[in-house]
Image (spheres, helix red, strand yellow):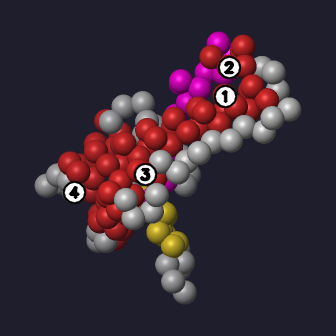
Amino acid sequence: MMIPVITLAAETTKPGTKDSASVFKALKDAFDLPEEAKKKNVYDSPFYGYRAGPLIEMLGVFDATHDVEPIQSFTNLMWPSRNQSFCEIMYHFAKKFSELDRIVTRMIHESYGLDKYFDRDCGIESFAHLLRMINYRVP
């Protein structure tokens, strides 16, 4: 059996490229917001919204890949005066990781000989992804 190889070395995925720099700037902008703004990021489900501890800070957007609306709502909540570039960058980022999730899940199905069931039974198109943004602090 051959072990599948995925090359993630496209020019747009390398650190320091325009795409990665845009994501890091967007994340910095989000974590630079005042804590009272970030505390507005709440969900009924535990660990979906804003969480902070001595060494970590997290923000989350649920169902961030089916439609831009959840990320747009998050953006409007954090920046009432709007920050459209954050919304566009993070939606693009979330979609790319959703596509990667689909590729890996298909590969797992194929490795077990279950690829014929992937599209029909997997239901991956209906998966809701949580976009979790994490800022690790230096101790």
Quarter the N terminus occupies: top right
Mark before the other along the chain sequence, 2 or 4: 4
Mark before the other along the chain sequence, 1 or 2: 1
Looking at the image, do the residues carrying marks 4 and 3 touch, with CB atoms under 8 Å apart? no
Neighbor class of circle 3 (other Cα within 10 Å; few <14, some 14-19, many 20+) is few
For residue 118, which numbered disc appears in the image? Answer: 2
Query: SS class of the residue under badge 4?
Result: loop
Mark before the other along the chain sequence, 4 or 1: 4
- Quadrant in the picture for residue 35: bottom left
Looking at the image, do the residues carrying marks 1 and 2 touch, with CB atoms under 8 Å apart? yes
Residue ID at (20%, 53%): 83
| Residue depth check, mark 4 versus mark 1: number of the one nearer the observer | 1
Could you tell me how far apart the alpha carbons at marks 1 and 3 are, in whole angstroms?
24 Å
| Residue depth check, mark 2 versus mark 4: number of the one nearer the observer | 2
Mark before the other along the chain sequence, 3 or 2: 3
Judging by the rendered image, the residue that carries numbered circle 3 is 11
Whether residue 134 appears in this view of the structure is: yes
Could you tell me how far apart the alpha carbons at marks 4 and 1 are, in whole angstroms?
38 Å
Residue ID at (68%, 19%): 118
Amino acid type, callout 1: Arg
| Residue depth check, mark 3 versus mark 2: number of the one nearer the observer | 3
The residue lying furthest to the left in this view is 81
Judging by the rendered image, the residue that carries numbered circle 4 is 79
Name the residue nearer the viewer: 104 or 129. 104
Location of residue 2 with respect to 77 vertically, above or below? above
Location of residue 76 with respect to 50 vertically, above or below? above
Judging by the rendered image, the residue that carries numbered circle 1 is 106
Quarter the C terminus occupies: bottom right
Question: In the image, which residues are magenta?
Answer: 120-133
x and y percent of residue 55 in the render?
54, 78
- Left or right: 14 with respect to 119? left
Amino acid type, callout 2: Phe
